[in-house]
Amino acid sequence: MRILSYPVLLCLLVLASPLAFASATDRPLDSHDADVFDKASLRRGAETYVTYCQSCHGLKLMRYSRMARDLGMGDAVLQGMLRGVAKPSDSMLSAMTASDGEHWFGVAPPDLSLVARARGADWIYSYLRGFYMDDSRPNGVNNFYYPDVAMPHVMSGLQGNLRPVMHKVNGVDVIDHLERATQGHVKEAEFDTIVTDLVNFLVYVGEPSQLERLKLGKWVMLIMILLVILFRRLKDEYWKDVH
């Protein structure tokens, strides 16, 4: 029996981790194609994060100044995000302490710097759209993709409330899908756009260098192709009289 080397095994584990998260509830995820080059979407996502997420979840690996530079934010927008408390050089931390989070929610809200790399864009997109009413939970909500979630539905005012539609499997009631119970402040398509922008922002935060890396990679590949053509012609010219 062949034993996989450590590097190969590590690569397999890294590649398999998003699939493990996606299949944790045996429910198919909604597809989301993240676009980190849509700067307008990233800016809107950053504002959504600051408004709805940062009170509980921090981004300790991201600085305000780096985000503002990468996303082309003006001084007025950046100052609004700083709220007169943080400095541009500060990391985007949450004001909530771990002990407060455990006291209020039973668990400390996690830092979201690497959530997109750990969970994947599809999972985050599905999770944010998967909250539904559940009177048995402390906050009155549950999540279709993360059962018994401790997090409240902070964007319920935008989305409205969903209720589960049940069906029986082997005589047991299980959730088949979610349907709208009350309308939020925005239409469903608008809410999906808000979530899309937020997911795009979190994907960017997970690897800010990809903005430069992916652009640079295209030029590197082009140069490599040109070099291959050049070296092939040099080889043919050098060996044309040698048989």
Image (cartoon, grey):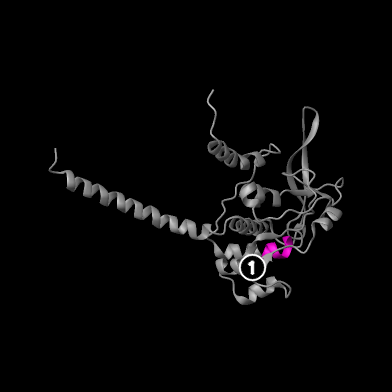
Q: Is residue 40 visible?
A: yes
Please name the residue shown 44% across and 55% down the image: 217
Query: Which residue position holds label 1?
Result: 64
Residue 32 in the image, given as x and y percentages of width and height: 59, 50
In the picture, the quarter occupied by the N terminus is: top right
Residue 21 in the image, given as x and y percentages of width and height: 66, 42
In the picture, the quarter occupied by the C terminus is: top left
Q: Is residue 129 visible?
A: no
Magenta highlight on residue 27: no
* Relative vertical location of residue 128 with respect to residue 27 in this rendering, above or below: below
The extreme top residue here reads 1
Which corner quadrant of the image does residue 152 belong to? bottom right
Q: Is residue 103 left or right of residue 68?
A: right
Image: magenta residue range: 47-54
Which residue is nearer to you in this view: 205 or 42? Answer: 205
Residue 146 in the image, given as x and y percentages of width and height: 74, 44
- Give the amino acid type for the residue marked by disc 1 in the picture: Tyr
